[in-house]
Amino acid sequence: MNAYLSLKKNTTKQIKKISHLHVFVLPTAFAVVIFIAYTLYLSLRAFIQLETVSPLSFPIPSPADYPMLTEKISPPISAEAAIVMDAQSQVIIYSKNPQLRFSPASTTKLMTALTGFQYFHPSDILEIKAANVEPVIVGFLQGQRVRFIDLLYGMLVPSGNDAALAISQNYPGGEDAFITQMNKNALLFHLVNTHYGDPIGLTDDETYTTVIDLARLTSIALANSQIRQIVGTKYTSISTVDGTVFPLKSTNILLGEDGVMGVKTGYTEGAREVLVSSVVRGSHTFIIIVMRSDDRFADTETLIHDVVDHVNFVSIRF
């Protein structure tokens, strides 16, 4: 009997110890599990955000009808490199020396516009820090203040170098930081044969691209509705904050003719004549580029009539 009572007392003590242990251990273990799960959730959420958020979005082509030429064509053009690309499908319809690198001259300003849009809002006020940037200028004076959107018009319509320089010099870190960001964007856009040495397009030795890369850049630029509107503008005027008015005229004489809706001219002695064009036929937009041309406008008209006007679209359904 004594042995039974002693065993019962010991058993009761052990049960109380286990009960006290459960009171302490189980909530603690539960709290640890909750903490680990929450930490994993935060890490997963950060990873998802890192993978899905891009500093500069660009268009991903949706499925489209496939463009095909009705016959093999060898258009007589003076340009050393050229390309015709369907903007919707990103299919290259015609190309000449597509991988050769040449200076893009002032078509560089398409990247300048996109890079500026990464930081500036259209209504932001920028200061003209340097004036009389030869050879092509809007005519801004040092110290004048201009809205970013008006600088874009000044840069892309008459190809004002002073406007392009003002955008880069007002960027955080100045012109050098801006050029660095331009080259980062070239990598982001998979422009593997492109490099920028300045925001204007004057440094032929340091700034180069190919017609393929320039066509890709153009499709990205045209996805921005404000850029698309600006490069399609033939005549307009802008003003500084103090009210000084500057009339603007496009350097693209083909603009508004034969379906040409833009985009940008370029010229230096090293680059020779360069022209980036967007041409609309029905519901389709074509990007045409000629580089190192003797007559960029004549070459582009030839590509419109000999290539674009002979394209048929085949519907592909899976």
Image (cartoon, rainbow, N blue to C red):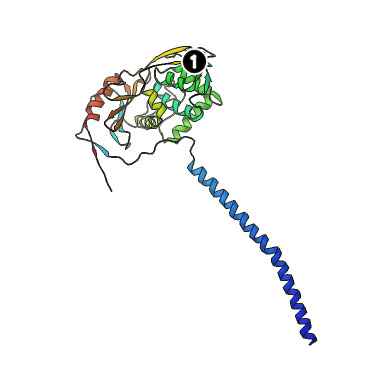
Measured along the vertical axis of the image, is residue 13 above or below residue 289? Answer: below
Q: Secondary structure at mark 1?
A: loop
Residue to which mark 1 is pinned: 240
Percent of width and height locating residue 120:
50, 27
Percent of width and height locating residue 73:
21, 31
Residue 109 figure quarter? top left
Percent of width and height locating residue 304:
25, 26
Residue lying furthest right in this view?
2
Measured along the vertical axis of the image, is residue 134 above or below residue 86? Answer: above
User: Toward the viewer: 88 or 241?
Assistant: 241
Q: Residue at x 30, y 37 (%)?
A: 91
Percent of width and height locating residue 293:
31, 21
- Counting every numbered tag in the picture gives 1
Q: Is residue 135 visible?
A: no
The amino acid on which the numbered mark 1 sits, given as a three-letter code, is Thr
Q: Residue at x 50, y 12 (%)?
A: 141
User: Toward the viewer: 178 or 33?
Assistant: 33
Measured along the vertical axis of the image, is residue 53 above or below residue 114? Answer: below
Residue lying furthest bottom in this view?
1
Quadrant of the snapshot with the N terminus: bottom right
Q: Is residue 237 visible?
A: yes
Residue lying furthest front in this view?
243
Q: Residues within 10 Å of mark 1 (few under 14, many from 20)?
A: some
Horizontally, is 29 left or right of 115 in the view? right
